[in-house]
């Protein structure tokens, strides 16, 4: 069924005693503007003034309007008609157009009739009856039909949208005190679905209120209603006298990004909360309204020290980097900061989906989640967490911009565009916070970035010695072939050499999805929990961790469990790892194997390294790293300069690199078949990350030739 304003008589049978200005703002609605004008003119309670606005339409709206105005002036000479056309578009701010209309209005009442809507001819008659009955009313609105672009009725009411709490309130007419309406209804959501359904008194504060509404792109009408009702009462008609057009193929109201809408919902709610003392129920309603949009907010995240946005890439399998981000973010929340997280969206995931992924992979998260990098509101501080987030932060409208750096990321890539862009990220002028001393020195000494660092620490409640675990003649390797910096080709060949020389040594792989590893007798544990990691470290005699872009947190957790560590003798490992708890080997498989075998062959060395590493880590509990990190943030918020610690750094590892033994070299020459890994890279891992199957096949061909892997985050 369709609505048809042209059916029946269009006689205006009432003599108006109040002057009404109808304002029609238009942009590219040439197909609807004539009907809209007629629906205004056909009112049984006639208007005295018609103002038509055009915001530099790109269709033939101006031509259609000018032609229609000629007819209107002849047929309705008693109506004052104005046509105000912009030569330049206002930039999509509809509220500036509304303000322009109000500034030119002379009527006692204002009706903003949007150009693509329509209405019943008794709309103004009903509104003016309500104003006449209650002189305190400053805003009237009615229920609405929902129609499409063909005037087909999609719904005979909007109460399903208006009545969020299913109270039945909007099934009957009502009056209400304006401030009560704000506190008990508008504080949670906006029940006034369409401005075309509204008539308001032309109070002197309207211009100021409309000026304030320009700060909004979506929720400015809601803000306007909440401000207008400070000056009087509200009246509602349950008759659906307004025809609210929702275009099937999308409109300005349906293509607005979710993050923007969410941010403005929060902004209006907080604006009302700051002006009125709301009940606990109404504050909970606000939270329910936000969660209804698919966003997740944690009630514990209510800090008052400052608002911080974290910009975070998508998650890679077993990512220790993301774990570090979440733990430090949660510490800021507990310290009094309000934190939001903006996560890269590969498949337009909803925030609640991202939240569940975080909770499943990294535990409880005390933050609000957004999908994508577009900031929903203004923050006191914005923090980049990877090279591909730094430019977003550099361009953010924020005074305090930080860069949380966990790796020298250019080394993730061969010399390429990605390498240069990652390197460029250190030149945006962001203040750097690094994990570890070497990275602070590397970046602070070579790029125009001030860097401070916090130490590598370990959670000693989770990583510690266990008395009830029987030691095995075993070595464990953090195995993550999706991360080239883990140097798995070197590590796997080293383990082949170890096994060739001493077949009794058991090998455990962990840290990524299980893969079938050929030509190496190893047990692949897959991705395991922190508690399982601690048991593994207590069970093994040597821990092998390879990291070529910054020390990993893994060796420190291994040492906290009393496990001797073998790592690469590379510049990134010489400033943070202690020489008594680790052996650093030259970056070749034979030298790595030699270091592993050296520990197995010398029980006294093994015990010495175990005790030294354990003792060292007792001075570096995870709380110390948190305190250092929070102290840096506190200083930044206090307006103090972040110290450049790059010049303070000295080597912590001064021993010589372990070189390859003749036995290891000989064993390496005897190995004819290198280690191979089935399904490399694993299809499910990259499909989840958003890669197409075609891109995956190309990556697999490249992997077979070069053994490099695409990094998914």
Image (cartoon, helix red, strand yellow):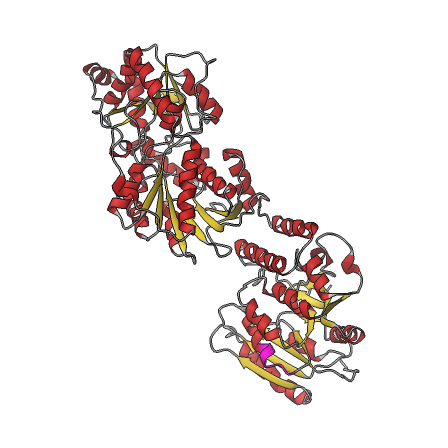
- Residue 397 position within the rendered picture, expressed as x and y whole percent measured from the top left: 43, 58
Furthest toward the left, the residue is 662
Magenta region: 101-106
Compared with 162, 96 (above or below) is below
Q: Look at 39% across and 49% down and name the residue there.
A: 402
In the rendered view of the protein, which quadrant contains the N terminus? bottom right
- Residue 617 position within the rendered picture, expressed as x and y whole percent measured from the top left: 38, 26
- Residue 105 is inside the magenta segment: yes
- Residue 167 is inside the magenta segment: no
Compared with 418, 14 (above or below) is below
Q: Look at 77% across and 75% down and name the residue there.
A: 135
Q: Quadrant of residue 590?
A: top left
In the rendered view of the protein, which quadrant contains the C terminus? top left
Q: How many marks?
A: 0
Compared with 620, 23 (above or below) is below
Q: Is residue 672 visible?
A: no
Q: Is residue 199 visible?
A: yes
- Residue 472 position within the rendered picture, expressed as x and y whole percent measured from the top left: 40, 12
- Residue 609 position within the rendered picture, expressed as x and y whole percent measured from the top left: 32, 19
Q: Quadrant of residue 196?
A: bottom right
Using the image as rendered, state which of residue 324 and residue 59 is in the foreground.
324
Q: Quadrant of residue 142?
A: bottom right
Using the image as rendered, state which of residue 690 and residue 450 is in the foreground.
450
Using the image as rendered, state which of residue 703 and residue 382 is in the foreground.
382
**Relative horizontal placement of residue 676, taking residue 634 as reference (left or right):** left
Q: Look at 55% across and 42% down and name the residue there.
A: 353
């Amino acid at each position: 069924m369709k609505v048809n304003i042209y059916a029946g008589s269009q006689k205006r049978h009432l003599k108006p005693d109040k002057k009404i200005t109808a304002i029609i703002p238009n942009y590219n609605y040439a197909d609807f503007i004539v009907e809209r004008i007629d629906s205004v003119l056909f009112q049984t309670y006639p208007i005295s003034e018609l103002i038509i606005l055009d915001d530099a339409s790109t269709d033939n709206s101006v031509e259609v309007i000018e032609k229609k105005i000629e007819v209107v002036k002849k047929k309705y000479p008693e109506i004052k008609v104005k046509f105000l056309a912009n030569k330049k578009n206002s930039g999509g701010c509809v509220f500036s157009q509304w303000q322009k209309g109000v500034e030119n209005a002379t009527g006692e009442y204002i009706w903003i009739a949007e150009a693509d809507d329509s209405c019943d001819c008794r709309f103004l008659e009903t509104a003016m009856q309500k104003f006449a009955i209650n002189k305190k009313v400053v805003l009237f609105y009615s229920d609405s039909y929902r129609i499409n672009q063909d005037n087909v009725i999609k719904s005979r009411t909007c109460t399903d949208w208006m009545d969020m709490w299913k109270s039945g309130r909007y099934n009957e007419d009502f009056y209400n005190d304006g401030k009560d309406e704000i506190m008990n209804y508008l504080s949670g959501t906006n029940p006034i679905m369409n401005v075309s359904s509204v008539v308001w008194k032309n109070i002197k504060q309207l211009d100021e209120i409309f000026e304030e509404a320009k700060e909004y792109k979506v929720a400015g009408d809601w803000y306007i209603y909440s401000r207008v009702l400070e000056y009087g009462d509200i009246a509602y008609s349950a008759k659906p006298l307004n025809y609210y057009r929702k275009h099937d193929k999308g409109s300005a109201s349906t293509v607005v990004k979710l993050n923007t809408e969410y941010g403005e919902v929060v902004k209006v709610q907080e604006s009302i909360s700051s002006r009125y003392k709301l009940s606990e129920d109404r504050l909970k309603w606000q939270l329910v309204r936000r969660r209804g949009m698919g966003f997740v907010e944690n009630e514990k995240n209510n800090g008052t020290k400052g608002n911080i946005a974290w910009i975070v890439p998508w998650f890679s399998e077993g990512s220790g980097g993301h774990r570090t981000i979440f733990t430090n973010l949660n510490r800021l929340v507990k310290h009094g900061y309000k934190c939001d997280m903006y996560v890269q969206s590969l498949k337009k995931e909803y925030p609640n989906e991202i939240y569940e992924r975080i909770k499943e992979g990294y535990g409880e998260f005390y933050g609000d989640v957004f999908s994508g990098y577009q900031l929903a509101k203004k923050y006191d501080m914005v923090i980049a967490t990877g090279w591909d987030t730094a430019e977003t932060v550099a361009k953010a409208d924020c005074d305090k911009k930080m860069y949380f750096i966990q790796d020298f990321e250019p080394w993730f890539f061969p010399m390429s565009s990605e390498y240069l862009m990652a390197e460029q990220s250190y030149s945006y002028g962001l203040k750097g916070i690094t994990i570890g001393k070497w990275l602070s020195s590397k970046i602070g000494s070579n790029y125009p970035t001030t860097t401070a660092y916090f130490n590598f620490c370990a959670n000693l409640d989770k990583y510690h010695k266990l008395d009830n675990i029987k030691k095995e003649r075993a070595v464990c390797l953090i195995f993550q072939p999706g991360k080239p910096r883990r140097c798995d080709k070197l590590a796997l060949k080293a383990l082949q050499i170890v096994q060739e020389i001493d077949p009794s040594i058991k090998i455990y792989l962990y840290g990524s999805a299980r893969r079938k590893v050929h030509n190496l007798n190893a047990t692949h544990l897959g991705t395991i929990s922190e508690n399982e990691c601690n048991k593994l470290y207590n069970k093994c005699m040597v821990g092998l961790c390879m990291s070529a872009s910054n020390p990993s947190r893994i060796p420190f957790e291994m040492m906290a469990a009393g496990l001797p560590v073998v790592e690469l003798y590379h510049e990134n490992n010489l400033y943070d790892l202690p020489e008594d708890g680790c052996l650093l080997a030259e970056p070749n498989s034979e030298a790595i194997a030699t270091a592993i075998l050296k520990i197995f062959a010398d029980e006294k060395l093994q015990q010495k390294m175990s005790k030294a590493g354990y003792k060292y880590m007792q001075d570096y509990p995870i709380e110390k790293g948190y305190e250092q990190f929070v102290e840096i943030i506190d200083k930044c918020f206090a307006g103090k300069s972040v110290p450049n610690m790059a010049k303070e750094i000295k080597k912590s590892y001064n021993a010589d690199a372990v070189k390859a033994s003749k036995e290891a070299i000989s064993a390496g020459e005897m190995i004819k078949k290198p280690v191979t890994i089935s399904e490399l890279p694993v299809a499910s891992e990259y499909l989840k990350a958003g890669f197409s199957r075609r891109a995956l096949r190309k990556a697999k061909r490249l992997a077979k030739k070069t053994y490099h892997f695409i990094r998914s985050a």
